[in-house]
Image: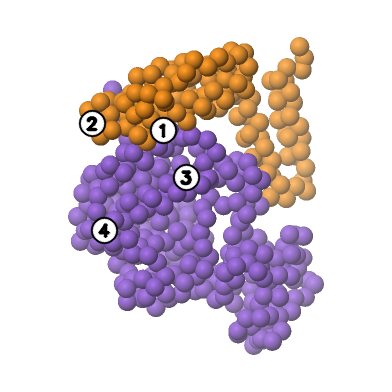
Chain colours: A orange, B purple
Amino acid sequence: MHPTIDEQLTGALRLLDVLETEDELSTASREVLANVRRLLGKVQRSWSAQLPFHTADNAALTDLLERTAPLVDPALVPTGTTVEPLDAVAVATRNSELRALLSRVVTGLPRSPAGDAARAQIGDHLRHRVDTDPT
Amino acid sequence: MTTTVTDTETDTATDDGSTTLERLTRFLATQEGTAGTRIADLRRAGAGRSRENWLFDLIGPGPDDREPLILRSDPDGGLVDTSRAVEFAVLRALEPSPLPTPRVRWLDATGEQLGSPSLLMRREPGACDYRVVNGDRPLPVRRALAETFCDLLAAVHATDWRGLGLAEVLTDPGEQAALHELDHWEQVLRHDQLEAHPELDLAIDWLRSRARPSRRTVLVHADFKPGNILLDGDRVSSLLDWELAHLGDPLEDLGWVTQPLRAGEHLIEGSWSAADLVARYTAATGLEVDADELRWWVVFSTFKTAVMQVSGLRAFLEGRADEPYRPTRRVLSTLLTALTGPRS
């Protein structure tokens, strides 16, 4: 069990604290350290929430594409691809694939009331995603 | 023609600085007007490795001659890919104008001698402070500075670009300035994106369907902000960073300075609003600003910021930049809110 991922990340951040107390660090080195700290902090805050986020977003995206893609090209409706639900990388990859389909739908939507309704639905989805994305 | 450096003058340079010093010395030795001069006090401008600006003085040939200079080189992985040669030509063309611009001295357009495309310009006195209008000065002084910056923007747009020969350097997009800029930044996005960004595609769709013809063509600075304005006390000594300058719609700069993402740099809560800025700009230029037209450029400015972050992310992942850029929640959320309106 130990060290957990969180413990290892906390440890890495603590070691950066030790390094930062060095008097002889250049300004450039301090800037690099600050960037490493930002990246590690972001990973620490988000790693455990990524899989449930991508799983939920994949379901929402599939539903959204089923409603909006036929306006552009029925081939853009996602097929029933099976993804191992506990494989975080596979689920994230599927999320990228679905987002790529959504981009193609956005790019091809007609200028019509139905097209505008689809744009509004897509806008709502993306706003929710941006608000809840833990990464 | 000799350009020499003494050992004591290299004390402040790092190893990295030694390379720059060596290249600079060789480069200047081949340039007009450097006979009998030497480089002194070379040091990196700014704090980090991502910045490629170097400060130094060129001493001689007379005993009292000392010219403060700045070497501006392309970093390996910047947020934007621009041409030092164009920037040099724009600044050279602007020298007879009343605008406070840095005087350019020499250019290495290809980077053959200085390692990467570079230009050398005279260093003006003062300092840049991107938060100056919300800084420590008393409110009346900050408000006066904000007005001065607005007047400076109006002066940039009043530049006689035809008379100065800028049409030979920059493309005139005519009344299609909005679509011209949108095409350009979409091209940057397509080149640099590593994955799909439906948020940005939605923005492109919105912008493309609402672009309007511009009513006049002016010189656009395209990165107008206090962080690029050199202040000597409370006096503007120079407007810097012309790398994105182009001909286009004046509302492009106005959209850039009034976009919500940059409110903290340009506006003062309770004292200097976007409406105040636009009103003063209109009084100075005579250009009535249509709210919908300006909204288009505000959305475009946010879109452009997001594209810059996409480019920065790629540069970071490819090891060309040390700053871990990414399209941030703040930028994407601001963009989507601008497209779809406030939540009900």
**Residue A112's mark?**
2
- As helix, strand or loop, the secondary structure at mark 2 comes to loop
Say what amino acid the circle numbered 3 marks.
Answer: Leu
Q: Secondary structure at mark 4?
A: helix
x then y, percent, for residue B85: 52, 68
Which amino acid, mark 4? Glu
Give the residue drawn at x 69%, y 87%.
Answer: B1
Say which element carries label 3: helix
Crowding near the residue tagged with mark 1, few <14, some 14–19, many ≥20 C-alpha atoms within 10 Å: some
Q: Are marks 2 and 1 in contact (CB under 8 Å)?
A: no
Q: In the rendered image, which residue does mark 4 sit on?
A: B175
Would you say B6 lies left or right of A74 here? Answer: right
Q: Are callouts 2 and 3 both on one chain?
A: no
2 or 1: tag closer to the N-terminus:
1
Looking at the image, is B48 positioned above or below residue B339? below
Task: Estimate the spatial distance between the alpha carbons at disc 3 and disc 1, rounded to whole Å.
Answer: 15 Å
Quadrant showing the C terminus of chain B: top left
Of the image marks 3 and 4, the number of the one nearer the N terminus: 4
* Residue closer to the observer: B83 or B31: B83
Q: CA distance from mark 2 to mark 4?
A: 27 Å
Instruction: Please give the chain letter of the residue carrying mark 1.
Output: A
Disc 3 vs disc 1: Cβ atoms closer than 8 Å? no
Seen from the viewer's position, the closer of residues B103 and A128 is A128
